[in-house]
Amino acid sequence: MSEHRYETFADFWPFYVREHSLPACRAIHFVGSTLALVVVGAAIYLGNPWLLLATPVVGYGFAWYSHFFIEKNKPASFKYPLWSFMADWKMWAMILTGRMGAEVEKAMAMAK
């Protein structure tokens, strides 16, 4: 049985959104991504590049927790690391601007 592979980011995005259908999952992702930005800012402000080593731990730690314990699915970053990284920041911006809820509704409707 062959598995579907996404060929474009545009095709991947609705899948990514459906994998983040629960508001709690998206909220934890948002916190992790925001904290990752804080760590980068602190590294720059303090002039300590070693702090950057904490960035993926913070960002992915929160995200993976939300998948394993809230969504109960496997993070898309395991199969699509670059597109997942891009989609994380797109979702972060859409949450920040209040547009992610509608995006989830749209992606869920597409799957029916």
Image: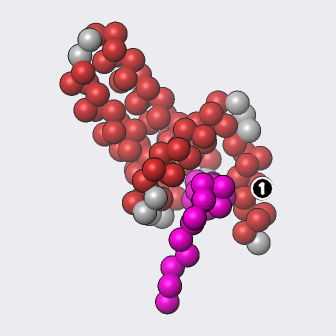
Instruction: Bin the neighbour count of mark 1 within 10 Å (Cα to Cα): few under 14, some 14-19, many 20 and up.
Output: some
Residue 37 against residue 1 in the figure, above or below: above
Extreme residue toward the front, this view: 7
Relative placement, left or right, of 107 versus 34 is: right
Q: Name which quarter of the figure residue 57 lies in.
A: top left
Rendering coords of residue 98 (x, y %):
72, 34
SS for dot 1: helix
Q: Is residue 11 one of those drawn in magenta? A: yes
Rendering coords of residue 64 (x, y %):
40, 51
| Residue lying at 73% horizontally and 49% vertically, measured from the top left | 103
- Give the tally of numbered discs: 1
Task: Please name the residue that numbered disc 1 is placed on.
Answer: 106
Q: Is residue 48 one of those drawn in magenta? A: no
Give the amino acid at mark 1: Lys
Is residue 14 visible in the rendered structure shown here? yes
Quarter of the image that includes the C terminus:
bottom right
Magenta span covers which residues? 1-20
Please name whichever residue, 24 or 52, is drawn nearer the observer in this view of the structure: 52
Rendering coords of residue 6 (x, y %):
57, 66
